[in-house]
Image: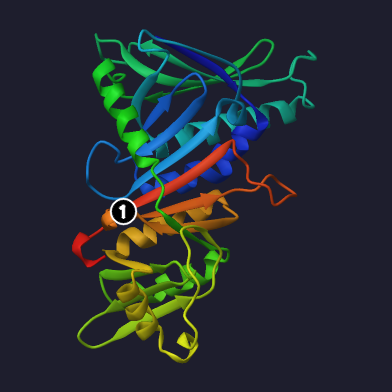
Amino acid sequence: MKFRAFLTDNGVNLLDKRFLPALDKMGKICYLYLTRDHVYFLHNLLNGDGIQSIAQFRIEALFDEYRISSQNDDRISFTIDLSLLHRALRSIISIYTEFSASHGGDPVGDSAPNRLQIKLVKKLPPHSQQPMPFLTLEAKGYRSAVIQDVPISKPLSRSDVLELQAALDMAQDLPQTLIRVPDMHQLQNFVDRMKNVGDVLNVSISKYGDLHLQVSTTLITLGAEFRKLLVIGEQAESPTGDQNLSAQSRTRVALQRGDAMMVQVSVKHFFKSLQCHFAKPDCAFYGIAQQGACLTVIFQFFIPGTHQTDKAISLYCRLPVLDPGSS
């Protein structure tokens, strides 16, 4: 199996400044999954433990001169330590930038631009007799190269890749109702206070566009409500007169009417999902899967300077529920 590509300037910026810092908050180790058309960073897709996160990029969003081949329909996957990958990327950027600057931006008087290549290799580590797989980053100049090797797991077998693809396909099912939260800072401020109150968060989402969050203990109840948000999918008209009800009463009535769903999730997981703000999304959509199977958070990115969705990039999380019967 072979993989080689060149990171574009946009690809370097997306990974270094945005997605690697965000994904590292989801978990240190993830699957890197390469196909002919897409690159995926996947957390917890093959086990039920913890929050699942899926970051997907079209090839052109990160690379040019992309080459991949394997006997498994040109699909390759392995686990990688995101902190090591980010450290290697930053190191190679800083070293080569410093080297280029000290030579007036043209280290050897050659007009060929520097390019950052990424590829799969097998190397013999020091004090080892067994070659090991690495993801290698290489900044190539005319007469010099800066190389960083990131250790990876043995690439997944054909059956494991098929299992990963099946889990990925299943994770892309959308909730029937999604509501849009345009200002994530409000959510972050609330969760910062909520972290110190309790461990379990009640999340209700209505077809009216209401998001209600509540954490309770025997001594205190803390809640927040976001109303009349944009709804995608199944929606309903808000009952007249409900503005005179409390948030809890509104939620209870909506649940009784079948116009809302409620799940309980870990405060820790909800807080972790908000760390995706490091990837600089423009807004987020929240929804509850059928039968209250999970809480889904979809982060939306706009093409710079527009309000059009950047379809080359996607990032979403699935939070496991603590009590599926509460929906």
Left or right of residue 118: residue 288: left
Viewer-nearest residue: 156 or 106: 156
**Residue pointed to by mark 1:** 290
Q: Quadrant of residue 207?
A: bottom left
The residue at the far bottom in this view is 244
The correct choice, above or below, for 32 with respect to 222 in the image is: above
Q: Secondary structure at mark 1?
A: helix
- Side of 92 relative to 305 (left or right): left
Residue 3 versus residue 63 in the image, above or below: above
Q: Can you say whether 303 is above or below 252 in the image?
A: above
Which x, y percent locates residue 77?
Answer: 36, 23
Left or right: residue 314 compared with residue 75: right
Q: Residue at x 48, y 17 (%)?
A: 119
Determine crowd level at label 1: few under 14, some 14-19, many 20+ residues with C-alpha closer than 10 A: some
**Count of marks placed on residues:** 1
Inspect this view and state whether residue 320 appears: no
